[in-house]
Amino acid sequence: MITQTSCTVFQQNLLNGNENFTTGTYYIALYTASANLDNTTTAYTTANEVVGTGYTAGGGQLTNLGASL
């Protein structure tokens, strides 16, 4: 079951300044409700990922992540 949250590792990286939204590459994947994902998830997994028409295995790359004022 998926728990709506952000991964603890990602939160720690943000607080430590280890994420760079200007030069980093980020992906987002779509999963079924049967996926076992929660705040302890540390890496991408193919288990229960949706793959088919309109969806790409491995997730889609997020673009335009730079912040603006």
Image (cartoon, rainbow, N blue to C red):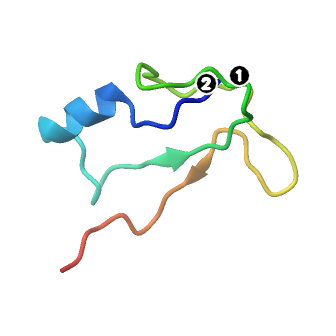
Residue highlighted by disc 1: 47
Q: Residues within 10 Å of mark 2 (few under 14, many from 20)?
A: some
Q: Residue at x 73, y 48 (%)?
A: 56
Residues at badges 2 and 1 in contact (C-beta under 8 Å)? yes
Q: Residues within 10 Å of mark 1 (few under 14, many from 20)?
A: few
Residue 1 horizontal side relative to residue 17, left or right: right
Report the front residue among 41 and 4: 4
Count of marks, rendered view: 2
Q: Position of residue 10 (x, y in %)?
A: 31, 34
Residue 33 horizontal side relative to residue 4, left or right: right
Amino acid beneath label 1: Ala
Q: Which of the 4 image quadrants contains residue 64?
A: bottom left
Amino acid beneath label 2: Thr
Q: Position of residue 3 (x, y in %)?
A: 53, 30
Residue highlighted by disc 2: 45
Report the front residue among 40 and 20: 40
Cα separation between marks 2 and 1? 5 Å
Q: Residue at x 31, y 26 (%)?
A: 9
Q: Which of the 4 image quadrants contains residue 53?
A: bottom right
Q: Residue at x 76, y 51 (%)?
A: 55
Q: Position of residue 45 (x, y in %)?
A: 61, 24
Report the front residue among 4 and 17: 4
